[in-house]
Image (spheres, rainbow, N blue to C red):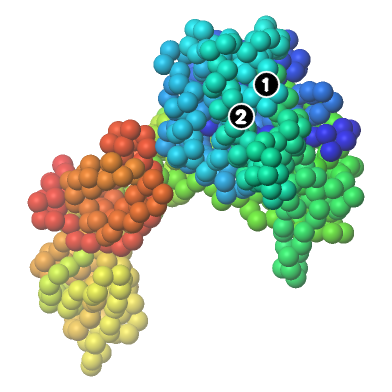
Amino acid sequence: MQEFEKVRNIAFLGHGKSGKTSLAEAVLHTAGKTKKLGSVNEGTSVLDFEQEEIERDLSINNAFHNCTWKKNRIFLIDTPGDDNFINEAKFACRVADNAIFVVGAVLGVKHQTEKIAGFVKDNGLPSILCINKMDRERANFEKTVSEIKEQLPFEPAVCYLPIGSEDNFRGIVDVINNKACFFEEKGTCSTGEIPDDMTDAVAAAKEELMEQIAETDDELIEKFLEEGELSDSELQQGLSRAVREGSLSPVIPCSATKNMGTELILNAINDYLPSPDQRPSQVGTEPKTEELVEFAPSIDSPFSALVFKTTEDPFTGKLSIFRTFSGILKGDTLYNASKDKTEKCSQLYILEGKELVPVDGALPGMITAAAKLKETATGDTLASKENPLVYEGLDPIQPTMSFSIRAASRDEEDKLFSSLTKILAEDPTLRLERQDQTKETILSGVGQQHLQIICARIKRKYKVDLQLSTPKVPYKETIKGTARVQGKHKKQSGGRGQFADSWIEMEPLTRGEGFQFEDHIVGGVIPKQYIPAVEHGIVNAMKEGVLAGYPTVDLKVKLVDGSFHSVDSSEMAFQISGSIAFKEGAKQAKPTLLEPIHNLTIYTPKDCVGDVVGDLNSRRGKVLGIDSEKNTEVIKAQVPMSEILEYTPDLTSITGGRGTFTAEFSHYEEVPAHIMDKITAEAEK
């Protein structure tokens, strides 16, 4: 196995359409790992290999590969940048040591860029900034670097300047070593003279870079202030240290699809980004004592790893993908410290796109997969049984959009839930629940496209046609007034008849108090053995209210009077009597509809606040407050569930894709009269 000091573990990150996958493909090709440069647009990418990814030109899942460059082994994770699949990027940042952060030179910094940069910052990942698509029309290197500096949590260090742009992009100037590099085929460069018209720009860039590097180190700043300059070797060493500490991020202009600049990126990975042993230790807890435990990222430490992805391979079955943080994994057993289970592991693999390559073990920094672990799930910690610890689990993005789901035919229903179980194991952002009131199965995800792609994947992999529809709103009914009514059931059809007579009084309760039943019978007018039957009949009738068939809640019923027949009365007769009494009483006690209200927390750019608030008002929302965060306004509101069933695409439209939200149930409120009339009319149809 590779010496782990020469391992580099890197996540390729950035917003959708910034060219992350194309850049990762170019890196693999330049390093000689792939014979042909894979193309996302042509469907030949080794990283976007799922059918849904090929059809949409869109990364959906984290993809894994590796290559060797100048004796260093680079394990890379190619992440999605689309909001619907951003959870993959979040999990990748949790297990990566470093980031190649890609920003398009045309589109610049977008809202997704800020969110993904936040993941990088939260995990303290040393980063290289790649300004991609420098060959495209309207590419602007200076503007993009300025946007990064102003809007992202990076301090960009411009150590390479582009030579030309758009169709004329043909090389870079190495600012530290004061030389030009011109791009050649297969991603390599040849050294040449710096263009005359760039001399002043290079000198200014070196001066600024010198100041940036000096400010990260006390000794360098003293020398810089005394002598006014630093040597090239001091700049190189100072930059390397600053990158590893997270103080600076080198900026490299490139073009992924033309494989321009990838040799520089590979060299920068080796020169600037830390190996696993140069990263801070991960901290976990001892499972039994819950004391903090810290294993150094060394081969001499006990083994520990975090499972951050689960997937189904068509040939090997379930794959648990994990990052090793400490120690060496060998042997045919794995200990799951999160669940205190020992599992058989027949084979370990490293992933190269869709290919699985068997390996004998795992070192710190390696991304490895184990097949057919029955108990292990995403977020579990694998460790040494003699030295167990549990790392903090993964925190997935919360779902924001829900659909009612069903199989296209009854024959597929069993297969549907079997396939959903496997998909849920693969994607922690999905949530499946049964809505008892509406009798619907609800699948929730990050967005509409997310759920549509899940349906396409289930159809392709498991041959089940899954249909999505807008879920029903779980309205409820209640009463606002009081009533005293009789529920009399009398039936005679030859032989023993049926007779039960009960009088009840109804009154409303405070919202959320549910149902209360009180026995006020005196004198034995209804025998004690029949009183529970009256309550049972009322409870059954409450399941379908008198307005639109929704459950009735928040009321008190007193059983106050009645009569019985010594022969014809029975528990069933009194159940029917209670049901009759409830239905009549509910009609007289001013029935009304209740609707679920959700708490919304909306994150939006400042320039969209007015439009978002106006839209919330049109949805009968109540804005509770607006707080400011960096570059973002946080709007808190309460909105009826019926008004936000399709809020995700609407918010995307209003904010140009820059807004996000979370929603959770809060309480029930009375439905306005004009809306209640529409709901009851629809129910009558």
Q: Secondary structure at mark 2?
A: helix
Disc 2 from disc 1: Cα separation: 9 Å
- The answer to whether residue 391 is seen in the rendering is yes
Q: Is residue 128 left or right of residue 685?
A: right
Question: Horizontal and vertical percent for residue 368?
Answer: 76, 36
| Residue at 24%, 56% in the rendered image | 623
Above or below, 494 against 261 in this view is below
Q: Residues within 10 Å of mark 2 (few under 14, many from 20)?
A: many
- The answer to whether residue 346 is seen in the rendering is no
* Residue 202 vs residue 25, the one in the foreground: 202
* Residue 536 vs residue 490, the one in the foreground: 536
Q: Secondary structure at mark 1?
A: loop
| Residue at 39%, 52% in the rendered image | 629
Q: Quadrant of residue 550?
A: bottom left
Question: Which residue is tagged 2?
Answer: 206
Question: Mark 2 touching mark 1, by CB under 8 A?
Answer: yes
Q: Residues within 10 Å of mark 1 (few under 14, many from 20)?
A: some
| Comes first in the chain, label 2 or label 1 | 1
| Residue at 22%, 45% in the rendered image | 610
Picture quarter with the C terminus:
top left
* Residue 584 vs residue 54, the one in the foreground: 54
What's the residue type where badge 2 is placed? Lys
Disc number at residue 178? 1
| Residue at 57%, 28% in the rendered image | 205
What's the residue type where badge 1 is placed? Asn
Above or below, 154 against 588 in this view is above
* Residue 423 vs residue 195, the one in the foreground: 195
Question: Horizontal and vertical percent for residue 613?
Answer: 23, 48
